[in-house]
């Protein structure tokens, strides 16, 4: 997750200082620079730079050496901090707008290994069965060891219709497998929604983009119109949602909370310390709500799930989330380059950090295939000789107020999705239990 700042940072002022010190050192020894440890280390850097320029077997441009030095600095930090060349900076800006050419996967470095956070829904990667946790060993003929995230992204993106072969390793595989994918223009539709049976709504949030909060609000309005009234319950699907913009995560959570803390961030500088609070205006009705998460739910997805869980607004169902609890700030540099730097950690309202841990669901439900099993042969009371006949309604004639079973046979989406089926059953059971309580009272 990241924020953007329209600043021009004079990184090259530092480089000018370094090189100036080196030139001065040739004449006056730069004696003042040697009095402080940081300056001594910078002097060592300029010494190495000078030796490379003078003695390396081939001539190397200053731009290449400086970029390599910057990448080296960021490489000793965390997997999410990186230098963005002008081309990479433009790619990053395309990401948040929701349209680009490529395979449709979000990636990260996990213990130094290029790993899929999640495939984006209805993309080449999704259709080929790539999954969260898959390790990318090679892209084409190039091993991914020592590749940065942005370098890997650049290799996988390309013109629509062209092909790229990636080699992946999965826990269930005995050896890596090659998969050839055809690049497409990836148009990420942030929000998809549909009305399930009996007035229960379903919203799939694929990514947190610039308009995700507004798009979600519009989708909920459409669902209410289709239902001809307020929803009886909602399933918010954040599975395989890799995250996105921090502000949009706060906007989404705010739709379902009347008050209270959504998320806060802590960092070394004042600008990185923020608090996001819920507002009463524009809040959705207080209908029952289930949020679906899995190992591909990361960053902004975890903020929303954590806020709704800590504020006891929704039941979280699924499997443990990814566990990315840091915030990246994107800073523009000279020559249209950029710096993606981790500047803060975020915390859920209860003060918990999900970094490398993730959100733990209230109800753990693992995905599985569903197979409808017919009742076998059995003898019932009605099959016995001289059984009593009961006048009036029988159990085989349900009253109107009975809640029907989930339509597994008629709804193909629910039929194939065990976690979604469980979420819908939970909402129906929730309503049924409320009715029992009212009757008992």
Image (cartoon, rainbow, N blue to C red):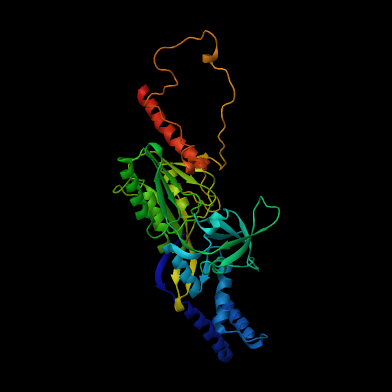
Q: Can the viewer see residue 105?
A: yes
* Outermost residue to the bottom: 27
Q: Quadrant of residue 272?
A: bottom left
Using the image, determine if residue 420 lies above or below residue 244: above
Residue 315: name its quadrant: top left
Question: The C terminus is located in which quarter?
Answer: top left
In the image shown, does 322 or 259 lie closer to the viewer? 322
Q: Nearer the viewer, residue 113 or 99?
A: 99
Q: Does 97 appear above or below 351?
A: below
Counting from the top left corner in percent of width and height, residue 75 is at 58, 68
Q: Position of residue 107 (x, y in %)?
A: 55, 60
Residue located farthest toward the right when viewing the structure as drawn? 174
In the rendered image, the residue lying farthest to the left is 281
Residue 404 position (above or below residue 259) = above
In this image, 396 relative to 82: left or right?
Answer: left
In the displayed structure image, the side of residue 285 where residue 74 appears, left or right: right
Location of residue 41 in the rendering, given as x and y in whole percent from the top left corner: 59, 76
Nearer to us in this view, 225 or 48: 225
Tell me the residue at 57%/78% (across/down): 42
Q: Decide if residue 350 is in sight here.
A: no
Which residue is pictured at 34% across the width and 55% down the height? 214
Identify the image quadrant of residue 166: bottom right
Percent position (x, y) of residue 185? 48, 64
How many numbered badges does the structure rendering display?
0
In the image, 350 versus 162, the foreground residue is: 162
């Amino acid at each position: 997750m990241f924020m953007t700042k329209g600043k021009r940072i004079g990184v090259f002022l530092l480089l000018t200082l370094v090189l100036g010190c080196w030139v001065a050192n040739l004449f006056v020894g730069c004696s003042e620079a040697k009095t402080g440890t940081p300056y001594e280390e910078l002097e060592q850097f300029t010494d190495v730079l000078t030796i490379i320029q003078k003695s390396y077997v081939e001539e190397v441009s200053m731009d290449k050496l400086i970029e390599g030095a910057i990448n080296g600095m960021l490489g000793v930090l965390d997997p999410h901090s990186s230098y963005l060349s002008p081309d990479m900076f433009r790619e990053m800006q395309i990401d948040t707008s929701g349209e680009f050419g490529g395979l449709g996967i979000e990636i990260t470095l996990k213990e130094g290994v290029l790993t899929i956070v999640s495939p984006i829904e209805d993309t080449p990667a999704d259709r080929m069965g790539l999954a969260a946790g898959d390790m990318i060993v090679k892209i084409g003929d190039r091993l991914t060891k020592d590749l940065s995230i942005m370098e890997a992204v650049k290799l996988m993106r390309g013109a629509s219709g062209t092909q790229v072969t990636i080699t992946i390793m999965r826990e269930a595989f005995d050896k890596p497998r090659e998969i050839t994918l055809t690049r497409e223009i990836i148009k990420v539709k942030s929000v998809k929604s549909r009305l399930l049976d009996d007035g229960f709504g379903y919203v799939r949030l694929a990514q947190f983009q610039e308009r995700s909060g507004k798009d979600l609000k519009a989708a909920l309005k459409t669902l209410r119109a289709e239902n001809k009234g307020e929803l009886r319950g909602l399933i918010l699907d954040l599975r395989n949602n890799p995250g996105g913009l921090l502000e949009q995560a706060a906007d989404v959570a705010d739709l379902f909370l009347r008050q209270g803390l959504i998320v806060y961030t802590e960092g070394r500088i004042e600008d990185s310390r923020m608090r996001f609070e819920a507002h009463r205006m524009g809040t959705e009705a207080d209908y029952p709500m289930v949020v679906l998460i899995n190992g591909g739910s990361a960053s902004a997805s975890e903020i929303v799930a954590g806020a709704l869980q800590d504020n006891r607004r929704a039941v979280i169902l699924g499997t443990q989330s990814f566990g990315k609890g840091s915030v990246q700030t994107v800073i523009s540099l000279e020559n249209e380059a950029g710096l993606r730097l981790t500047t803060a950690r975020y915390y859920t309202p209860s003060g918990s950090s999900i970094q490398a841990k993730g959100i733990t669901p209230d109800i753990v439900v693992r995905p599985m295939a569903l197979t409808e099993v017919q009742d076998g042969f059995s003898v019932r009371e009605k099959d016995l000789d001289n059984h009593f006949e009961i006048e009036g309604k029988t159990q085989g004639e349900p009253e109107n107020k009975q809640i029907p079973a989930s339509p597994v046979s008629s709804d193909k989406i629910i039929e194939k999705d065990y976690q979604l089926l469980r979420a819908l059953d939970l909402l129906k059971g929730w309503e049924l239990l409320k009715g029992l309580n009212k009757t008992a009272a």
